Image: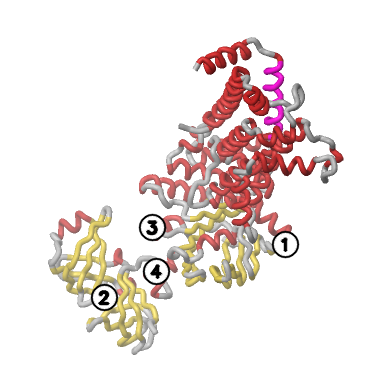
Amino acid sequence: MKSKTLIKIENIIVERSGVTVLDIGELNVQQGRILALIGPNGAGKSTLLLTLAGLLKPSQGTLYFQELPVDTNAGRAILRRNVAVVFQEPLLLNTSVYKNVAMGLKFRHLSNDEIRRNVENALDYFGISSLAKRSAKTLSGGEAKRVSLARAFAIKPRLILMDEAFNSLDPPTRETLIDDLRHILEETKITAVLALHDREETLRLAQDVTVMVEGIIVQSGTTSQIFNQPDSEFVANFVGTETILEGTVQSSNAGLMEISVAEKNISAVGDFLPGQNVYCCLRPENIIVSKDVPEKISARNVFEAKVQKIIRQGFFYKLILDCGFPVVAYITMPSCDDLGICEGSVISASFKATAVHVMRRE
Amino acid sequence: MELIVQGIIKAFELIVSFDSEVLGITWLSLKVSGTATFISLFIGISIGTAVALMNFRGKRLVISLINTGMGLPPVVVGLFVTIMIWRNGPLGFMEILYTPYAMIIAQAIIATPIVMGISLAAIQNLPPNLRLQILSLGASRMQMVWVLIKESRLPLLAAVMAGFGGVISEVGASIMVGGNIKGYSRVLTTATVMETGKGNFDIAIALGIILLLLAFLVNLLLTQIQQRQHPR
C-alpha cells in the first residue's frame, strides 16, 4: 500500500514564556496510520497534539496538512475542518448526550437531517445509542469518554488527535474501550495520533510510535522497531525492556557476538567490533525458565539462576533472577506452581541470541 | 406593638384592595429595575466574558476593579449620574434628570459590575481545555464564546438575581436622580423612605412587604429555572 503524508511538521519550535517546550525537526504522519506519542510527563506530547490541531501557534517552523502550509488562511481552514481533538477529560457540555455529539456538526451548519444521521452513526459506533437522551452530567466516566469520542468522530475528521484518552478509566472499561476504538479506527481508516503513557495501550493500538522526552523526539519508527530495537537506553527503559545489562563485545563472527557481562558470556546477534562497550536488552517475555538445565535447546544462552524475588503482576509472576547478572522473567502462575519455584530456588534461565537487543554504549 | 400590628393590617388592606397608587408604584419599580437589570446583562456579560477570555497586561487590576464595582455605593452612583445629567452637565441636553430614565441609567450602572463580576468568575471557572475542545470541533470564535456563555447559564442566572436584587432594593440613587415625584418617578423604596419620614408607618410597612414579596417572587421564578437545569 502506498501511503501518503497527511500531516507534516518541519522545524517547529514552540515556546512558553520564553522557554522552549517543543523542538521538532521533522514528524510525518502517514494517511490511515495510527501513531502513538509516548514519553514521560512533560515530554511535550500534549503540546505537540495542540500544535498538530492548529490550536497552538508555533514560534517557528511550519505545519503542513495535505501538503498545504497551515500558516496560510486556506491551509488553516482545511486543517480546522478536518481535525478533531479528544482531551484527557471528556469536557462535555451540560446538556443531552445527543446535543453534545451534535456540537461539531452544528458549527458546520449542517441540516438537521444530516446532523441526526451523523450523530446516530457516531453513537452507534461507540455502542451508546441508548444514552442519546441522557443528560451528559449523569454519565459514568466510561460513558462520558465514549460520548466525547463519538463527538469527535461525528464530524468525520481526516485526523483525530487524542490526549491520554484512557486515563482515569477503571481497567475493564479501559480494555473494552481500547478494543472498540481500534476496530473503529481500522474501519473508518481515520488517521490518528494518540498521546499514550502505557506501553500496553501502545502495543495494542499503534502502528507507529514516536518517543518524546523534554520536547524533542528521541526515536520514531514502527511499533515493533521501537519495542524491539530501541536505539537508546532511555527508549529501552521507557518501552519496558526490563533487563538492561552493560557489557563489552569479546568476539564477533558472522553476525554472532560473544558479549561479556559480569564475567559471564552472552551470545547475541549483531556486528559490533570486539572491544565495543554495549548495552544488552532482554525483554522478560523472552526468557524461558526451567527447573533443570535443558539438554536439547536452540537457545544459545542458558544460565543457572537463583530466584531472588517473585512479584505478582495481574495474571502472571515477575521473577527477579540472579544469573551472575540480574535478569527479569515473566512466568504464568500455573507454570510457577508446576515447577515449584519459590524465592531462593535455583533454576535455569535460557534465551535465544536473537532475543538480545544490543545497543552501543559510549 | 400596636403600631406594628396596625401597620400590618393596613398593609394587607392596601394590598388586597389593589390600591391604585400602590399598584402604580409597584409597577414602576418593576419596570425600572427590570429594564436596568436587562441592560446590565448585555453590558455585564459581554465585558465579563471578554475579560475572562482575553489575556492582557493589567488583567488582574481590571478584575479587582470589577469586583470593587460589585459593591458600588448607590449614593455615589446617584451623585455621579446627577452631575452628568444636571442642566449644564455634559449630558444635560438630554433633560432626563428626575425621570424614570435617569433611574434606569443609575440602576444599570449599579447592576452592571455585579453581573460582570459573576459572569467573569463563571467563565473563568469552566475547565481551561473546554475552549480548545470547542474550537477543535470547528467552532468559530463567536460560536465558541456563545457555547461558553450557554454553559455558564446557571451562575449567570445567579448574576441576574443578584443584579435585580441589588437595584430593586436600592434607594439612594433612585431618590437622587428620580426625585420621588408622585405618580411619575416614585418607586417602592423611595416611597417607603418618604412615608416613614412622614410617620405613616402603616403605608411604609405595606410598601416594605410588597418590596419583599416582589424580590421573593422574582427570585423564586429564577431559582425554579436554575434548579430545573441542575441535576440533583
In the picture provided, is A226 more to the left or to the right than A109? left
What is the C-alpha distance between the residues marked 3 and 1?
Answer: 39 Å
Kindly state the secondary structure of the residue where label 3 is placed: helix
What residue is shown with label 3? A200
Q: Position of residue A356 (x, y in %)?
A: 33, 74
What is the C-alpha distance between the residues marked 1 and 2?
Answer: 59 Å
What is the C-alpha distance between the residues marked 4 and 2?
Answer: 19 Å
Q: Disc 4, disc 2: CB below 8 Å?
A: no
Q: Disc 1, disc 2: CB below 8 Å?
A: no
What is the C-alpha distance between the residues marked 3 and 2?
Answer: 29 Å
Q: Position of residue A135 (x, y in %)?
A: 51, 34
Q: Are marks 4 and 2 on the same chain?
A: yes
> Vertical placement of A66 versus A102: above or below?
below
What residue is shown with label 4? A228
Closer to the eye: label 4 or 1: 1
Q: Disc 3, disc 1: CB below 8 Å?
A: no
Spot the residue most to the right.
Answer: B93
Closer to the eye: label 3 or 1: 1
Q: Which mark identifies residue A300? A: 2
Badge 3, how many Cα within 10 Å: few under 14, some, many 20+?
few
- Position of the N terminus of chain A by quadrant: bottom right
Q: Earlier in the sequence, mark 3 or mark 1?
A: 1
What segment carries the magenta color? B21-36
What residue is shown with label 1? A72
Kindly state the secondary structure of the residue where label 1 is placed: loop
Q: Amino acid at mark 3?
A: Glu
Q: Quadrant of residue B86?
A: top right
Q: Nearer the viewer, residue A68 or B166?
A: B166
> Vertical placement of A137 versus A50: above or below?
above
Q: Amino acid at mark 4?
A: Asn
Q: Earlier in the sequence, mark 4 or mark 3?
A: 3
Kindly state the secondary structure of the residue where label 2 is placed: loop
